[in-house]
Image (cartoon, rainbow, N blue to C red):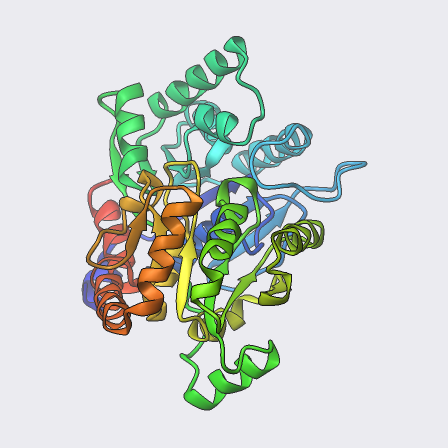
């Protein structure tokens, strides 16, 4: 779209509600930040209402408004937790007061804040856009929150209620669109995948050598991972796979960046128990601006998830990194990955071990997959492609 076309469009004033610690280095906060970024770049203004935790970001036209702290709650874990209930109550009150003060063109909600939009939209006669990052009942199942029949019924009812009271819905992957249409067949759903995180320039060869030296990986074949250390990520399974083929990969080391201190400590103990503690490097969570160089030092990047259907945000950055990818052959990955750009295996230690050994032994395969992955990211998941999808949603009346 050229400048004249952009300037002729109506500039929207958007109330965005995100029941997350924005910004934090994890999936949904990244997505919230990217939505704000692209809307600001397209000339719209956003008032973002979010939790009292997290780091600010600065985009022209975006203003962050945080709720007050709730006594006894100092942070929020990934997934649903009962601590979210009082924080969401404060968020709803803040949103209600904001709607009374200001005339917004649309309410844009994320995750369970969709219920707030479904209530406030009709109340103030303002259209509601629901950003669907996961299925509410599925989230309860995946994080073992509760699978009691009354709870699951309420989650399914809530999801359908939100969809019914949304002008349009953004699904972050095709499977979520299927879930939305199964719940409400006439829902107006647009798939807009998440975005590879662009934290800085690609490091040069000298910088790569320096980073390898920093972590004691100078001459190693680096099997990498970046992201959270939650149970669904399958990291212990990946460690077991590495153990099985470690004798055939004498120069290989695991390099898993991310996780909370307690999680890192627990994984280190598991690696030690497997006998690969001396071949495991765990730097903990690193700043986002280091991610390009962290991925650049990896000879293989892994995503060994065991469960789930939503596409992990890290995959888009993995594609962009130029490192070959090893992942489990599950819907959570195959909505983005296929055999042309990754090695996909069954979600077992034995299958992952054989996939890893295949990549280790075949340099030509690694280069072929890497080149294809980079091209796929440019075509489908780059910022220009992302902006085009959002622009199409705007032109289609989704906002």
Question: In the image, is residue 345 above or below residue 293?
Answer: above
Q: Nearer the viewer, residue 274 or 183?
A: 274
Q: Quadrant of residue 201?
A: bottom left
Residue 324 relative to residue 242: left or right:
left
Q: Quadrant of the N terminus?
A: bottom left
Q: Residue at x 37, y 59 (%)?
A: 356
Q: Quadrant of residue 57?
A: bottom right
Q: Nearer the viewer, residue 344 or 272?
A: 272
Image mark count: 0
Determine if residue 142 is in view. Answer: yes
Image location of residue 178, percent across then percent down: 26, 29
Q: Residue at x 44, y 27 (%)?
A: 138
Determine if residue 44 is in view. Answer: no
Image location of residue 87, percent across then percent down: 66, 34
Image location of residue 227, percent across then percent down: 52, 55
Q: Quadrant of the C terminus?
A: top left
Q: Residue at x 39, y 32 (%)?
A: 126
Q: Residue furthest front?
A: 247
Residue 241 relative to residue 381: left or right:
right
Q: Residue furthest bottom?
A: 206
Residue 384 relative to residue 198: left or right:
left
Q: Residue furthest right?
A: 72
Image location of residue 107, percent across then percent down: 43, 37
Q: Nearer the viewer, residue 3 or 156?
A: 156
Question: In the image, is residue 301 above or below residue 105?
Answer: below
């Amino acid at each position: 779209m050229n400048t004249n076309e952009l300037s002729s469009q109506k500039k929207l004033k958007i109330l965005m509600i995100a029941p997350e610690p924005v910004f934090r280095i994890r999936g949904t906060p990244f997505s919230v930040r990217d939505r704000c970024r692209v809307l600001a770049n397209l000339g719209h203004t956003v008032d973002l209402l979010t939790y009292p935790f997290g780091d600010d970001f600065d985009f022209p036209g975006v203003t962050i408004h945080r709720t007050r702290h709730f006594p006894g709650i100092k942070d929020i874990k990934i997934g649903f937790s009962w601590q979210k209930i009082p924080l969401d109550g404060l968020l709803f009150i803040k949103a209600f007061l904001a709607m009374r003060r200001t005339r917004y063109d649309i309410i844009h909600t994320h995750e369970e804040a969709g219920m707030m939009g479904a209530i406030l939209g009709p109340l103030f006669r303002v259209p509601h856009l629901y950003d669907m990052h996961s299925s509410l009942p599925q989230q309860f199942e995946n994080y073992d929150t509760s699978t009691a029949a009354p709870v699951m019924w309420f989650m399914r009812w809530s999801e359908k209620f939100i969809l019914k009271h949304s002008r349009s819905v953004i699904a972050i992957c095709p499977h979520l669109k299927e879930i939305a249409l199964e719940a409400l067949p006439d829902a107006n759903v647009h798939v807009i995948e998440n975005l590879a995180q662009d934290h800085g320039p690609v490091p040069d060869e000298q910088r790569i050598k320096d980073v390898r030296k920093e972590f004691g990986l100078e001459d190693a074949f680096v099997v990498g991972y970046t992201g959270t250390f939650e149970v669904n990520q399958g990291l212990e399974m990946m460690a077991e796979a590495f153990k099985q083929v470690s004798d055939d990969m004498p120069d290989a080391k695991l390099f898993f960046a991310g996780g909370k201190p307690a999680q890192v400590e627990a994984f280190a103990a598991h690696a030690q128990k497997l006998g690969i503690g001396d071949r495991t490097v765990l730097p903990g969570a690193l700043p986002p601006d280091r991610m390009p160089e962290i991925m650049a030092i990896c000879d293989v990047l892994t995503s060994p998830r065991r469960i789930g259907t939503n596409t992990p945000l890290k995959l888009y950055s993995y594609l962009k990194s130029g490192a070959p990818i090893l992942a489990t052959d599950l819907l959570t990955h195959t909505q983005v990955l296929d055999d042309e750009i990754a090695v996909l295996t069954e979600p077992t230690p034995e299958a992952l071990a054989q996939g890893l050994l295949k990549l280790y032994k075949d340099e030509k395969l690694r280069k072929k997959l890497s080149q294809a992955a980079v091209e796929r990211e440019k075509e489908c998941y780059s910022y220009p492609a992302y902006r085009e999808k959002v622009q199409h949603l705007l032109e289609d009346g989704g906002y």
